[in-house]
Amino acid sequence: MITSVLVANRGEIACRVFRTCRELGIRTVAVHSDADGHALHARVADTGVRLPGTAPADTYLRGDLIVQAAVAARADAVHPGYGFLSENAGFARAVLDAGLVWIGPPPEAIEAMASKTRAKRLMGLKPLIDVTEADLPVLVKAAAGGGGRGMRVVRHLADLDAELTAARAEAASAFGDGEVFVEPYVENGRHVEVQILADTHGTVWLLGTRDCSLQRRHQKVVEEAPAPGLPGELQEELSALAVRAARAVDYVGAGTVEFLVADGRAHFLEMNTRLQVEHPVTEAVFGLDLVAEQIRIAEGHPLDSTPPRARGHAVEARLYAEDPSRDWSPQTGRLHRLALPEGIRLDTGYTDGDGIGVHYDPMLAKAVAHAPTRTEAIRKLASALERAVIHGPVTNRDLLVRSLRHPEFTAARMDTGFYDRHLPDLTEPSPDPHAPLAAALADAHGRSRFGGWRNVPAQPQTKRYAMAGQEHEVHYRHTRTGLEADGVRVIHAEAHLVVLEVDGVRRKFEVARYGDQVHVNSTALTVLPRFPDPTTQHAPGSLLAPMPGTVVRVADGVTAGTPVKAGDPLLWLEAMKMQHKITAPVTGTVSAFHAVPGQQVEPGVVLAVVSET
């Protein structure tokens, strides 16, 4: 019987496993890097063990340190979560060799399937070796791990070597394994997967399908179960292939077999020998706790002969601290408040007041809605996200709401090219035009009480805010009867709530201020000083760091005085386990170049200046 579990992971998945362990009466052990010393998963566990350092290679990818931590904390078992070492057969063996229970598949099954190259050979498929123009487009893909890291679409043969290099670096950083391979790229297919669960007694459960077609950077954003609109024959084919993959390696535990579906055909992608990020939608539909089932299987308990019956539909959206309108650039800062309406499952590794750093994935939370029908589940989730309180860095919340309401998605006609086609429309700014006035009135609350009234009109007050990249100036006036603003009727104004009547319609504005940052309902604003600071001005053509990160590479030969063309790569930043290419915005000359490999940069730091020809 397992009485204590160490989770060899961090963030949301560690918190999620701990929740089930608590319900089962199992003691929990966390491991944490120095950057995660005060993270939620480290705080909620019964016991914690420090992994010195911040980089994944020094902490969460150090299997030897994690096994030592499990032994020191007297854990019975290790749960790997997803990512990091979850598909590392050597780590699984080390756990077993230490006399601990491994809550996952046998190392041999991991070895056979965790490497995508070996998995394809097992399924009778081969990666491309010598790529020619006729093979394009192709996909460069990490052999280990997942989550979109170490993946690149190559459409021009001249770009292949550079993309191979970038993919290897990302894969090594995320998974400790830099092996990559090349395969044909299936354009605009649907990403469909099958959840399986197998015990040590030969029973394999098929727990339905999921559709994960809405992706950015080959990483899933919206997932649902079951996958809608699949013909019966195709569903049978997917199920048969999934069982075949599981039986081929004597699989045990939770696993997922992934496919691209195009032209009515299923193209095998890989088998993930771990719990998936999107497992909650399957749990909601089947009424299961997959983590509890993993633990029971690890204890040797058999599954029932048949799985429970599926009920209804579930949709999950991943909330990221990122700006989709700026090439999905990750964001950092303080998460002041995160709350969703009741009836929505929220899996998160953060709580109010936590800091979002640069070292790990920018996912803040997963929001899951379950309902009798797909239409109801989509409507429920979109409404909940729209009304969610999210105060802090920029997130993809608006993108998620618009994606869920897009006619392609509601009609189940989406594919993996969804964001390639629709991103500009989905990220078009639509801030509330009355948010700046509401912020100003909330700030002015109570000021009219100071001093005596005089028989002269009060001078108009002015406030300036930045909203959606634009400056907004608002005016209001203190009167004997309260606050007055042009064009609207002020019904009520206090520090946290403003009520305005606009064109005969009464509207409420909930206001929260954190320093110079103001949140008015779902609109974020920044208070601007009355007079701009001249020291913040930059030379024309300045390339500013879009995010905090590390300069990992500089393009060959680029220095001050180098001529460049628009779109030429100048350098690469690594942030939150992804590499981001910084390119020349115009054709011209590099008049200044400040980036140095290994340099840590903050947002807004000038990396280079390109003077246009």
Image (spheres, helix red, strand yellow):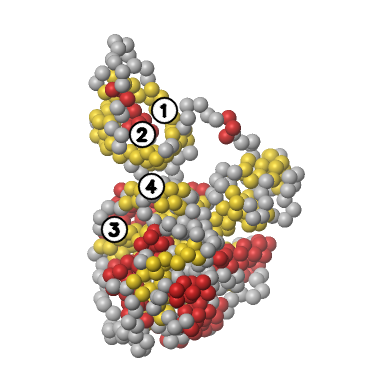
Q: Looking at numbered disc 1 in the image, what kind of residue is underneath it?
A: Lys
Residue 566, given in percent of the width and then of the height, sits at 65, 47
Q: Looking at numbered disc 3 in the image, what kind of residue is underneath it?
A: Ile
Label 4 and label 1: CA atoms lie apart by 24 Å
Residue 309, given in percent of the width and then of the height, sits at 25, 76
Say the numbered circle drawn on residue 344. Answer: 3
Relative depth, front residue between 613 and 397: 397
Which tag, 2 or 4, sits closer to the chain's start?
4
Q: Mark 4 or mark 1: which is in front?
A: 4
Q: Secondary structure at mark 4?
A: loop
Which residue carries the number 2 mark?
439
Task: Look at the picture and state if 437 lies above or below 51.
Answer: above
Say the numbered circle drawn on residue 336. Answer: 4
The quadrant of the image that shows the C terminus is top right
Which tag, 1 or 2, sits closer to the chain's start?
2
Q: Secondary structure at mark 2?
A: helix
Q: Secondary structure at mark 1?
A: strand
Relative depth, front residue between 15 and 536: 15
Residue 114, given in percent of the width and then of the height, sits at 50, 77
Which tag, 1 or 3, sits closer to the chain's start?
3
Q: Looking at numbered disc 2 in the image, what kind of residue is underneath it?
A: Ala
Q: Mark 2 or mark 4: which is in front?
A: 4
Label 3 and label 4: CA atoms lie apart by 20 Å
Label 2 and label 4: CA atoms lie apart by 17 Å
Which tag, 2 or 3, sits closer to the chain's start?
3
Which residue carries the number 1 mark?
463
Label 2 and label 3: CA atoms lie apart by 29 Å
Residue furthest to the top in view is 455
**Contact (CB < 8 A) between labels 2 and 4?**
no
